[in-house]
Amino acid sequence: MTRTRLAIALALLLIPASARSEAAGETAAARWLDGLVVVASRRPQPTAEAIGSFSVLDRQTVDRLQAQDIRDLVRYEPGVQVTADAARFGLDGFNIRGVQGNRVAVRIDGVPLPDGFAVGSFSNAGRDQLDPELLETVEILRGPASALYGSDALGGIVSIATRDPGDLTAGNGSGGRARMSLASRDRSRRASVIAALQGATHGVLLGHAERRGHELDNRPLGAPDSNPADIDRSTSIGKWTIDGESARLKFALERFEANVDTDVRTLVNGSGQFATTERLLADDAERRERASAQLTFDDLWQLDELQLLAFWQGSQTLQNTLQQRRAAPPAARFPTLRERQFDLEQWQQGVEAIAREQTQWGGKTQQWVFGIEVFRTRIKEQRDGREINLSTGAATNVILGERLPVRDFPNSRLRSVGAFAAAEIPLWESDWVLLPGLRFDRFAVDPTADALFVEDNPGRSVVASSDQRLTPKLGLRFDVSDRQSLYAMVAEGFRAPPFSDVNIALVLPSFNYVVLPNPDLKPERSRGVELGWSGSSDALDWRLAAFHNRYDNLIESRVNLGSNASGATVFQSVNRTRARIFGLEASTELALSRWDARLAPYSLRMALAHARGDDRSRRQPLNTVQPDRLLVELQRSAQPGWPQIALSATAVRRVSRIDRSSADLFAPPGHVLWDLRLGKALAEHWRIDLAIYNLGDKRYWDYASLRSVTRQNLPDPSYYTGPGRSAALTVGWAW
C-alpha cells in the first residue's frame, strides 16, 4: 500500500469524528479525558490538554504486551523503534523519528540513564538497563524536548516510572503480585515478584525480576544457531514512602545486572580483521545501581507543589572477548589467541527542584512550572588485552601496535546546570491557549590526564571545555470543543558535545591511524515545527501530527581529515552534518458499536508512522530513519466467559532510500507481521496471557538491527532474520 493510500484511508476514518464530536457520548469521553500525561509539560495534565506527539503506556498495557524487553514496549508505537546490534551486543536504545542513541533522553524515576559509548568492534556500552516487569508507566515524547529536559533530548525523551507501594495496595493494607513467563523466541524464562505494605503514613515495597534466555530463534531451517548466547538479567527494587499531612518522602534503591555469553559465529571468516577469525567468544556484563530520595510538599509558601529529588547512580559495562585467529600471512603470521577487555564506568550525582503553581487572572487559570537541575558525572574507561602465539605460547600486550592497557579518552568529569520555566496561559475570553517554555543550560567537561593516559599519549595535552545554551519552545492550542483541539508548536533541542568526542585520543600504529581530540566542538542543535489535531467523539479517539525537524552542527565521530606530516591518517570528530527529518504520525481507536450495538466489545486501532530524512551536508538519505510502518489492530474487550483478544497486523515498507556512498549496506524488503494476543482472568486473583507472534511465520529483517550491516559482512542473510512464529505465555497471581 502506498503512502498516499494510507493517508487517504486514515483521513476517511477521521472525517466522521469531527462531524460527530459535538454530540459525543460519555463512554469515549471517559476513555479520552481520564488519561494523564506528565512528560509533555513536567506536570500531570489530562491528555486532551497536552500538546505534542506522545504515548502513555500504563501497567495494564505493558502486561497485555507481555513485554520481555524495551523493544517489546514500543512494538506497536508509531515513530518509535529500538536499535540493536544483531551480532553480539543486543538492544542498544531508543530511536524516535530517526534520532537515536544518546540524542534521545531516557529517565527512570527522574534519574537520567547513563550514556552509551562505543569504540571499535569489541567495545559497545548500550542503554538497555531496565526490566519492564517493575515499571508502572512509560511516557514517550517525540521531537525536540530540551526546553524541559536539557541536553540529550535532541530527538525526544522516554520517561519511565517504577511502581510505588500505593500502586499495589488499595489504601491501607498489603498487595502484590507474582508472575511467570515463557517465551519461545529466545527460549527464555522470566519470574517476578513484587509486594507492598501500606499503612496510614508509611509504605514499603520490595520487588525482584529475573529473565534467563538465549539467542533469538532466527536461524534458517536446518542450520545451526547464528550466534548462540546465554542471557541472565535481573533487577531488584526497594522503596520506602512516608506520607504526612502536606509532605511526602520517598526513598528508592534499584539494582540492575545483566550477563551475556555469546559465541559470535556471524563474524567468523568475515571481512577485514575478521577474515582470519576461526572463533569469537564474548562475555559481556552490565550493572547499574541507583539510590534516590524525593521530597514533595503541597501548598508550600505560594506554591501548589514543590518536588525535590536527589540521587546517586553508578554503572559499569565490562566486556571480554576471545578471538582465535588462524595463520594467514601477512594478516596473521601464526595462529593466535587475542584476549580483549573493555571497561566503562560512570558515576552520577544530581539534585532537582520542580515547583508547580496555579494563578488566577482575568477569570482564567494559568499553570506554571519552574525547575532547576544540577548533575555531575565521572567517567572512566579502559581497554586491555594480550595476544598469545598458539605455536610457542609466547604472550604480548601489544595488539595492532597498541601497547595495552590504554584509555581512549582521559578520566572526565561532566558538570551541567539547568533552569527552566514553562506555562499554560489561556488567552482572553477565547479558546486559545499559549504554552511558552524556556531553559538555560551551562555544561562543562573537565578531563584529567592520569599516568596511564599520559603513557599512551606522550606530549598530548587535554583541554577542558564549557559552553551554555538557551533553549525555547512555544506552543499554541485552539480548543475546538471540550474534546477536540488543534495545536502548533515550535521547539528547539540541543546536545552537549560528548566527552568521548571532545577528548578522544587513539593511536593505531599497525594501521597508521591517529585520532585527535576536539575541544572546540559546538553543541548539536535541532529546531522543530509540529502541527497536530487530536480529539475524541462518542466512538473514536484520534491523534494526527505532522512534523519538520532540522538538525545543525551534528557531530560526526572520527572523520577522516587526510594525512599529517608523518604520513599518518588523521581522524577527528567535527561539527559537519546538517540534517532534516519530516513526516507524519496518526493513530485512531474506533469503537465498532458506532455501526452495530452487538459489536460493543470490539474496537479497531490504527497507527501510521511515516518519516523521511536527509543528510543535507552530503546530499544523501539519513540511514537512521526507519521505514514507514502501519499498524491495524482489532481488539475485543474481556467479557464473561470470553478472553480479551487482540489481532494485529504490522506492515513495514521496504527500505528504498539508503546511503550507500561509504559502504554497500543491506536494505531489507518490506513485510507484514500478524500477532495474536489473548488474556483472561481465571479466578479472583489469577490471570493468564498468551501471545503468538508472526502467525504466518514470515521471513523478515528488522532494519533497526541491520542499519550498519554491509552485504560483504552478510554471508547468509538468514542469520539476521527476525524471529519466526513464536509464543509467549504468562501466568500471574495478584493479591
Image (tube, rainbow, N blue to C red):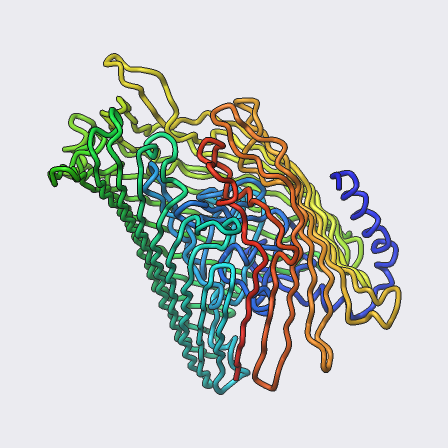
The answer to whether residue 52 is left or right of residue 446 is: right
* Nearer the observer, 494 or 499: 499
Q: For the N terminus, which image quadrant?
A: top right
In this view, the residue farthest toward the top is 565
Q: Position of residue 524 (x, y in %)?
A: 46, 34
Residue at left offset 74%, top offset 62%: 634
Which of the 4 image quarters holds residue 567?
Answer: top left
Decide: is 214 above or below 532.
Answer: below
Q: Is residue 578 left or right of residue 592?
A: left
- Residue 644 x/y as whole percent: 68, 72
Q: Residue at x 45, y 85 (%)?
A: 199
* Residue that appears at 47% across and 69% down: 297
Location of residue 529 in the rendering, given as x and y in whole percent from the top left corner: 64, 38
> Hey, which quadrant is residue 475 in on the image?
top right
Residue 47 placement (x, y as % from top left): 66, 59
In this rendered view, identify the residue nearer to me: 548 or 352: 548
Is residue 146 in view?
no
Residue depicted at x 67% and y 49%: 672
Residue 255 placement, left or right of 93: left
Q: Nearer the viewer, residue 482 or 338?
A: 338
Judge from the rendering whether residue 728 lies leftward or rightward of residue 524; answer left or right.
right
Q: Is residue 647 visible?
A: yes
